[in-house]
Amino acid sequence: MDSELLKGTLSLLILSLLSRKPMYGYEIAATVHRDTDGSFTWREGSLYPSLHKMEADGLIVGEWEEKETGRKRRYYQITKKGKAALREKVQSWTELCQAVNRILEKSDGQP
Amino acid sequence: MDSELLKGTLSLLILSLLSRKPMYGYEIAATVHRDTDGSFTWREGSLYPSLHKMEADGLIVGEWEEKETGRKRRYYQITKKGKAALREKVQSWTELCQAVNRILEKSDGQP
DNA sequence: CATAATACATAGGAATGCGATGTATCGGAT
DNA sequence: ATCCGATACATCGCATTCCTATGTATTATG
């Protein structure tokens, strides 16, 4: 997968996943990897900084959950602001797809 | 339009346009702007450096055409290597769309 | 003749995502 | 019992992309 095309989809998909239910970082990456049949494999260096930024921007809120054993996870929830951002991003994504496909279709047929 | 999502589509669309016929930079930008009903408005600072890089990478070749008056245009053609890159990029784009839409569809229905 | 559109170019900066690396816990296999 | 892979978090610095701003010059329009 051409990694350049992925840019911008990270936050879109994180917000979309969190609109289902609260999740923690590792779970988010694993879910995307599974749901896309391995097309998307987010690295820690992409995922965690992005989560931190989205939390700083108020799109999500995180909360530590510590099991009695000591294992820690940070669960993230989508906020009202995050839901609004998600709607906008989905709209942008839809427009982008239409615009790109309109161009590609005009050029199809040449091998 | 969320500009982050655009990343990576520039070279894809340039190659797609040039697979129709040779074009010059300004014409490429105008065509994309028109064909997408204004969704895409590439700036010179994006377009020309990208064309230079693609030529350096051997995906396209440019040739100056000077009218008798003195006006100069640089017409670009897609190369064999560029056509191969286009096929790959279209494939990546298709996979990306499917993968993203698969995630989004699972989360639809929540307003 | 002035102004907008055409047509090219580059320098500097912002933003994103990645590779590498580090820490620590948990579960299964040997 | 111990080792190792998977889980779970984090950050630094880099590469890449694209945009803003700026500059030059020609052509068409009012």
Image (cartoon, coloured by chain):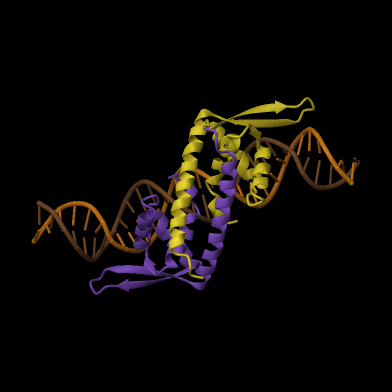
Chain colours: A purple, B yellow, C brown, D orange
Position of C2 with respect to B88 (left or right) is right
- Quadrant in the picture for the N terminus of chain B: bottom right
Q: Is residue C6 above or below residue A33?
A: above
Position of A27 with respect to B102 (left or right) is left
Of residues A92 and A71, the one drawn nearer to the viewer in this rendering:
A92
Q: Is residue B15 above or below residue A83?
A: above
Q: Position of residue D19 (x, y in %)?
A: 62, 51
Q: Is residue C28 above or below residue A109?
A: below
Q: Position of residue A51 (x, y in %)?
A: 43, 63
Q: Position of residue C12 (x, y in %)?
A: 60, 47
Position of C30 with respect to A13 (left or right) is left
Q: Position of residue A68 (x, y in %)?
A: 24, 74
Tally of numbered tags:
0
Residue furthest to the bottom: A68
The residue at 56%/47% (across/down) is A101
Position of A30 with respect to B18 (left or right) is left
Rendered image quadrant of residue A64: bottom left
Residue furthest to the front: A109
Of residues B17 and D24, the one drawn nearer to the viewer in this rendering:
B17
The residue at 36%/68% (across/down) is A74
The residue at 51%/37% (across/down) is B86
